[in-house]
Image (tube, rainbow, N blue to C red):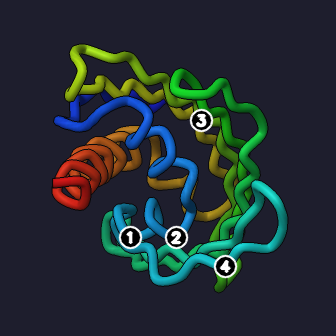
Amino acid sequence: MLISETFSVAIPIKILYEFLLDAKQVGLCIPGCESVEIVGENEYDSIIKAKVGIISTKFKVRTLIEETVPNRLIRTVGHGKEQRNLGQFKQKTEIKLKSLSENETEVSYQSEVSIVGRLATFGDRIMKSKAKTLGKEFADAVKSKLK
């Protein structure tokens, strides 16, 4: 499943880039994120709670910042397991930053997510609908946090 979103933030590109590399700060913007723990350089674990259809889930997620290009690009990979064994997922995310002006930055991200297990039986339609909602909530939280 492909998830993508583009939004702009009224902040200089350098400040936004540093913010997006700070796992603890970004965790505060991810809907349902209950905790973030740094486990190594560019690697962190998080607990994310989500409701998909009629099922509430809680995932333990390990994310690695795989590649960065200062003020332009961040690539991450991650994998997670639902705590009650309802499924597992893998993700690859690419975040691109583009300066629109001295004080405004465009964020464009694309995530490729694959889900296996009982959660996958809900089908792409429900998952995509939920992902779009979470994407907008994330964008709004980033904007709010950086005001």
Q: Earlier in the sequence, mark 1 or mark 3?
A: 1
For badge 2, the amino acid type reads Lys
Q: Earlier in the sequence, mark 4 or mark 1?
A: 1
| Label at residue 37 | 4
For label 3, the crowd category at 10 Å Cα-Cα, with few meaning under 14, some 14 to 19 and many 20 or more, is many
- Residue at horizontal 17 percent and vertical 35 percent from the top: 10
- Residue at horizontal 54 percent and vertical 54 percent from the top: 121
At mark 3, the secondary structure is strand
For badge 3, the amino acid type reads Thr
Residue 83 % position (x, y): 66, 83
- Residue at horizontal 71 percent and vertical 51 percent from the top: 78
Residues at circles 2 and 3 in contact by the CB criterion of under 8 Å? no
| Label at residue 93 | 3
Q: Earlier in the sequence, mark 4 or mark 3?
A: 4
Instruction: Using the image as rendered, state which of residue 51 and residue 141 is in the foreground.
Output: 141
Q: Earlier in the sequence, mark 2 or mark 3?
A: 2
Compared to residue 91, the image places residue 59 above or below, namely below
C-alpha distance separating marks 2 and 4: 8 Å
At mark 2, the secondary structure is helix
C-alpha distance separating marks 4 and 1: 12 Å
Which residue is disc 2 drawn over?
A: 24
Residue 122 % position (x, y): 45, 54
Q: Nearer the viewer, mark 4 or mark 3?
A: 4
At mark 4, the secondary structure is strand
C-alpha distance separating marks 2 and 3: 18 Å
In the rendered structure, the answer to whether residue 8 lies left or right of residue 52 reads left
Residues at circles 2 and 4 in contact by the CB criterion of under 8 Å? no
At mark 1, the secondary structure is loop
In the rendered structure, the answer to whether residue 28 lies left or right of residue 112 reads left
